[in-house]
Image (cartoon, rainbow, N blue to C red):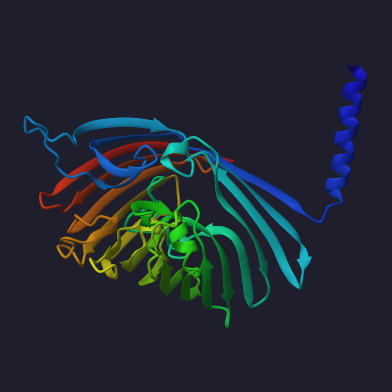
Amino acid sequence: MKRLLIGIMGLMGLMGVAYAQSPFSLQWHGFVNPHYYADSRSVVGGREDMMLFYPKPIVRDSLGHDINDGWQANMLAITARLGLKVVGPEMLGANTMAYIEGDFTGSTNATINNLRLRHAYFRLYWDSHELTVGQYWYAMVVHEIMPMTNPLNMGAPFHCYARQPQVRYSYFPTGNWELLAVAQWQLDNMSQGLLNGAPASSTLFARHSLVPELNAQIRYHSGKIFVGAAVNAKTIQPVVNTTGMAADGGLYTSLSYSVFGSLTLRGVTFRAQTLLNNNLYEGCSLGGYLMLADGTFEDWHFNTVWFDAERNTGHWRPGVFIGYAKNIDYGNHAGLTIFGRGHDIDYLWRVQPRLTYKTLKGLDFTAEAEYTMAGYADPVDNLRLSLSVVYAF
């Protein structure tokens, strides 16, 4: 046993010498995040409803009682996260880095508590341009202005929330302006369509189109000001047959637009975005598309706007999120096949105040109230009360 311990220690010493001579440096970080939440009503959401979209409609039993009404509560720690940043040597005349990050929310509701890949990308950056390749934030997720609400919500479904495999290129013509182009594919967040004649969520609808989802943005950075605009083009083949019993359908291309920005003023950060959303279901957003009786497709839009404000200094940091979404094509769905989220909602709004206490040493406590109103034919609301703790390292 003594010889074995000496051998292991010697091997570790050799590994340490080899690592010390490596041109790569490793930086670990992460956090543990227990999260308690209670809802006054059943909700449409993900991961044990920890990611809340909106309350469910009224559904009455044989006695006339609304089965979706009534309080329920839960506690989870699935957002515990571990990330590794790798800073590498200069390559091809560029500075280099890579990043890998995972948590335990799983890739679907069925795999909750399993390890899930969040980010896995490398980046090359020169003086005036930058290339990112791998899994990173979905292009319509402007992470620089992401709402600072409790996980997993992060402003969804008013603000998109997803990550996709992609190639992302940024060009900086001056010190303040940035031109961004993204080509991205699907994995965890998938399109909806007809697969072998049945409604399904699958990457096949995007894969069979042969066209990646494309996004272009223009951004302006100047000190405490950040503004930008984006256009997003998604092409899918909504009807796919893998059994050979029927022919595939044609392609459908949808366009979405966004204007966004943030401002830091006197210790308070303001963030806002407006979104004309057409088929951003994969981004945990509202809307989708419609299939007509003749097999053609029609746009289905939501118009969304949200605002977030938070104090960014001191121990006590109050904040508030406000979101509103309008179903522009509400009531035009009769007799059509519908793919997406929120077709039976005319409007959706949310007010979400929060209060965080930061020890400034990695331990944070947050209390939050989230009131969401969904404009079904019979409108309903939900109040979520939540408490969370983050121990970051």
In the rendered image, the vertical position of residue 230 relative to residue 27, given as above or below: below
Q: Quadrant of residue 312?
A: bottom left
> Which residue occupies the foreground of this view, 38 or 55?
55
Give coordinates of residue 210: x percent, y percent: 51, 69
Give coordinates of residue 57: x percent, y percent: 17, 45
Task: Report whether 187 appears left or right of 351.
Answer: right
> Which residue occupies the foreground of this view, 37 or 333?
333
Q: Quadrant of residue 329?
A: bottom left
Q: Residue furthest front?
A: 245
Q: Is residue 111 visible?
A: yes
In the rendered image, the vertical position of residue 19 relative to residue 163, given as above or below: above
> Which residue occupies the foreground of this view, 58 or 337?
337
* Figure disc tally: 0
Image quadrant holding the C terminus, namely: top right
Give coordinates of residue 215: x percent, y percent: 47, 72
Task: Report whether 227 appears left or right of 4.
Answer: left
Q: Is residue 144 visible?
A: no
Give coordinates of residue 8: x percent, y percent: 87, 28
Image quadrant holding the N terminus, namely: top right
Q: Name the residue at 29% across, 38% down.
A: 385
Q: Name the residue at 50% across, 73% down.
A: 221
